[in-house]
Image (tube, rainbow, N blue to C red):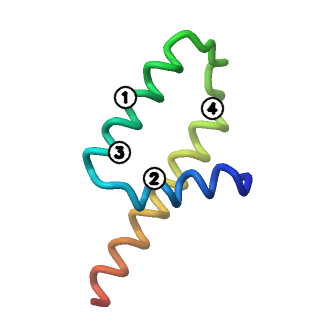
Amino acid sequence: MSAVVQNLLNTFDSLTDAERLDLLSEILRRTTDLEFLPLTDGDLILNAEDIFLTLDQEELDYEQS
């Protein structure tokens, strides 16, 4: 992930819920015409692995608090 993207995500995290919704709506509006290549099985596996690892870490953090 590039530094620019990480900075955007950090800024997103600091927004209020209303601001986040505004931003998400605008991003979705701007991306409706983009053409995306289909995800490969490898892409799906990596994304699923990342999600499960994140959930496992959140569960561990919750249990330790």
Q: Where does residue 9 sit, x and y in percent of width and height?
A: 53, 54
Q: Residue at x 51, y 20 (%)?
A: 30
Of marks 2 and 1, which one's residue comes earlier in the chain? 2
Earlier in the chain: of badge 4 and badge 3, it is: 3
33 to the left or right of 19: right
Give the residue at x 62% y 12%. Answer: 35
How crowded pointer 1 is (Cα within 10 Å; few <14, some 14-19, many 20+) is rated as few
**In which quadrant of the rendered image does the C terminus lie?**
bottom left
Q: Judge whether 63 appears above or below 31 on screen.
A: below
- Residue 25, disc: 1
Q: Amino acid at mark 4?
A: Asp
Mark 3 highlights which residue? 20
- Percent x, y of residue 36: 63, 18
Specify the farthest residue to the right.
2
Answer with mark 3 or mark 1, whichever residue precedes in sequence: 3
Of pointers 1 and 4, the one earlier in the residue sequence: 1
